[in-house]
Amino acid sequence: MRGIDREQGCIIIVRPGQYVAEVLPLNDFEGLTRFFKEVLINV
């Protein structure tokens, strides 16, 4: 469904309240960057 390779693995981003915020393929650096760009404050 999400294009995750069971042999390679994935990245799971979990919020402090144990909510699964995102599931990404292990090599999806652009998706990871896009997720945190919206969440983190750039100072």
Image (cartoon, helix red, strand yellow):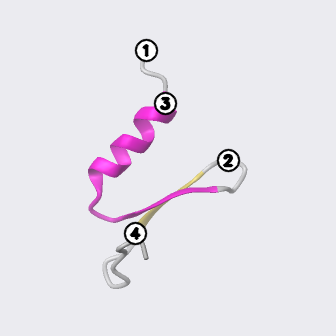
Q: Residues within 10 Å of mark 2 (few under 14, many from 20)?
A: few
Hey, which quadrant is residue 10 in on the image?
bottom left
Instruction: Determine the CA span between mark 1 and mark 2.
Output: 22 Å
> Residue 43 — which label?
1
> Residue 16 — which label?
2
Q: Secondary structure at mark 3?
A: loop
Q: Is residue 9 above or below residue 34?
A: below
Asked if disc 4 and disc 2 are in contact, CB closer than 8 Å, the reply is: no
Q: Secondary structure at mark 4?
A: strand
- Residue 36, x across and y down, in percent: 43, 39
Q: Residue at x 43, y 76 (%)?
A: 1
Q: In the rendered structure, which amino acid carries the disc numbered 2?
A: Pro
Q: In the rendered structure, which amino acid carries the disc numbered 4?
A: Cys
> Residue 40 — which label?
3
Q: Is residue 39 above or below residue 42?
A: below
Instruction: Determine the CA span between mark 1 and mark 4.
Output: 29 Å
Tell me, yes or no, whether the highlighted magenta stretch contains residue 25.
yes
- Residue 25, x across and y down, in percent: 35, 66
Tell me, yes or no, whether the highlighted magenta stretch contains residue 3.
no
Q: Residues within 10 Å of mark 4 (few under 14, many from 20)?
A: some
The C terminus is located in which quarter? top left
Q: Which residues are magenta?
A: 20-40
In the rendered structure, which disc, 3 or 4, sits on the residue that comes first in sequence? 4
Name the residue that disc number 4 marks: 10
Hey, which quadrant is residue 42 in on the image?
top left
Instruction: Determine the CA span between mark 2 and mark 3.
Output: 14 Å
